[in-house]
Image (cartoon, rainbow, N blue to C red):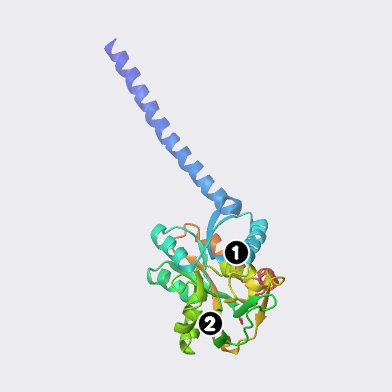
Amino acid sequence: MRAAKFVSLLAGLLLLGLLVPAGCGKGQDQAGQAANSKAGNPAGYSLLVYSGAGLKSPVEEIGAAFQAQTGIKLTYTFGGAAQLNNQILLSKQGDVYLPGDTAELKPVQEKNLVAWEKNVVYHIPVLAVPKGNPAGIHKLADLGRPGVKVALGDSQATPLGKLADQLLKEHGLLDTVNKNVVVRTPTANELVVYLSTKQADAAVIWEENYQGAKDKLELLPLPELKDYVKTVPVAVLDCSQEKEPARQLAEFFTSPAAYQIWQKWGYKPVDR
């Protein structure tokens, strides 16, 4: 009787031993199939894109074209360069980054978080005023006249603010104009709002920002700004868990199809 029980127990153990490897093997096979399915099906990917707030319109339109072509889902975080850099450095999450200037990549590069980068379009600064130029501004020195309300970008948060301060400093006007500054904004879009609502008489904005507000603003020729053109880069972040599709998206931002969209929004492609 004991022998029979022993044989029965042994048979059960042997059967269990056969089933366990089979079960593990099946799980590994399913995991492998899932991985292969994702690799062969880009629609399974989702990418997080960081972008300067002033680039929002073309970035979203180009992203929509990319998503329609590949099935890869995109989500976005828009903001000033300082805000985006802090978020990337703290979270170490995300896939693709488009700041307003190549210099804004430096904090991320110093932490070895840039895996690949390429220049995309030029950011051209211009002096804008409300339609009709009510304050009668015609040259850079006019920004320092008593009573003129000036709006500038935050020099600690955006390339636009940094270049405006540098421009004014080099022409000996920074202290004088600062007395007339009514607001410092973290994004170029907010400067357009101040001009459009006539809360400011003048502001240094990007040329493309003017494209969406032509009915409310006008541009003034300012030769001094020609030396302050910036370059927008696109970078694949080293913290990305999906570097291949991230690189695919980054390269799409410099494709002929994307450049048609960039140009529609007033951006000029870099020389290639």
Q: Is residue 156 visible?
A: yes
**Amino acid type assigned to the residue bearing label 2 in the image:** Pro
Badges 1 and 2: C-beta atoms under 8 Å apart?
no
Q: CA–CA distance between discs 1 and 2?
A: 35 Å
Percent across and percent down for residue 126 are: 60, 80
Tell me the mark number nearer the camera, choosing from 1 and 2: 2
Q: Which residue is mark 1?
A: 56
Left or right: residue 215 compared with residue 120: right
Per the image, the residue denoted by label 2 is 146
State the residue in front, 250 or 166. Answer: 166
Specify few, some or many for label 2: CA neighbours under 10 Å numbering under 14, 14-19, or 20 or more: few
| Residue 56, picture quadrant | bottom right
Q: Residue furthest left?
A: 2
Amino acid under label 1? Lys
Q: Indicate the position of residue 146 as horizontal and vertical percent values.
A: 53, 82
Label located before the other in sequence (1 or 2): 1
Residue drawn 50% across the image and 46% down it:
32
Identify the secondary structure beneath mark 1: helix
Rendered image quadrant of residue 199: bottom right
